[in-house]
Image (spheres, helix red, strand yellow):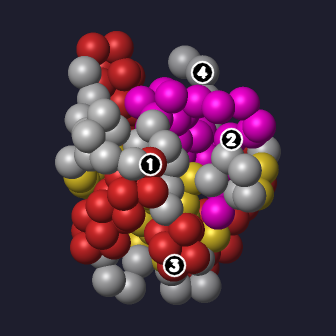
Amino acid sequence: MIRRATIVTVGRLKGWAADGCEDYLERLRHYFPVEIIEVLEEDMNRRSPQEVLHTEAGRILKRIPQGAYTVALDRERGKQLSSEELAQKLETLGVSGHSHIAFVVGGPLGLASEVLDKADFRLSFGKVTLPHALARVVLLEQLFRAVKIERKEKYHW
């Protein structure tokens, strides 16, 4: 299993999404360190979508930890995995020496191609479009579920 996770994400969370993330972060940190790195979300009203994506990509790429296996969330071209398959993938990565995983979550426009191209793996949570705040909550929940699956622990208490 992974020994450390970094989540590089566009934007700052508020309200219910921040509360949900904090809950799962607290649970996950019993198993391994998790760091959240929030990069500034570009103003979509002042720039074209391409400029927004490019600017956010620069911020994201600077913050991905060197040497970390990088997983980008990509609804359109990412691989859909069941919770069990995600647990198995993370376990396999850990066994093969990739103990630090960096997950990248884009903003409202997603991720620029330069970020997606640098990722070692693209993960999709399905064909539905999730708000980026919800995608972060789902990611943390799935990481927690993967840990429980890998350890053969009950998920619901």
* Label whose residue precedes the other's in the sequence (2 or 4): 2
Closer to us: mark 1 or mark 2? 1
Q: Secondary structure at mark 3?
A: helix
Q: Residue at x 25, y 73 (%)?
A: 62
Q: CA distance from mark 2 to mark 4?
A: 21 Å
What residue range appears in magenta?
Answer: 122-151
The three-letter amino acid code for the residue at tag 2 is: Phe
Q: CA distance from mark 3 to mark 1?
A: 20 Å
Q: In the rendered image, which residue does mark 3 sit on?
A: 118
For label 1, the SS is helix
Residue plotted at (60% across, 85% down): 96
Kindly identify which residue carries mark 4. 156
Q: Earlier in the sequence, mark 4 or mark 3?
A: 3
Kindly identify which residue carries mark 2: 125
> Cβ–Cβ below 8 Å for labels 3 and 2?
no
Tag nearer the camera, 3 or 2: 3
For badge 1, the amino acid type reads Pro
Determine crowd level at label 4: few under 14, some 14-19, many 20+ residues with C-alpha closer than 10 A: few
Question: Does residue 22 appear in this view?
Answer: no
Q: Is residue 16 left or right of residue 63?
A: right
User: Is 54 or 76 nearer to us in this picture?
Assistant: 54
Is 82 above or below relative to 45? below
Q: Nearer the viewer, mark 1 or mark 4?
A: 1
Q: Are marks 1 and 4 in contact (CB under 8 Å)?
A: no
- x, y (%) of residue 34? 31, 53
Identified by mark 3, the residue type is: Lys
Point out the image quarter for the N terminus: bottom right
Image mark for residue 49:
1
Q: Nearer the viewer, mark 2 or mark 4?
A: 2
How much space separates mark 3 and mark 2, taking CA atoms? Answer: 20 Å
Residue 78 placement (x, y as % from top left)? 71, 57
Q: CA distance from mark 1 to mark 2?
A: 23 Å
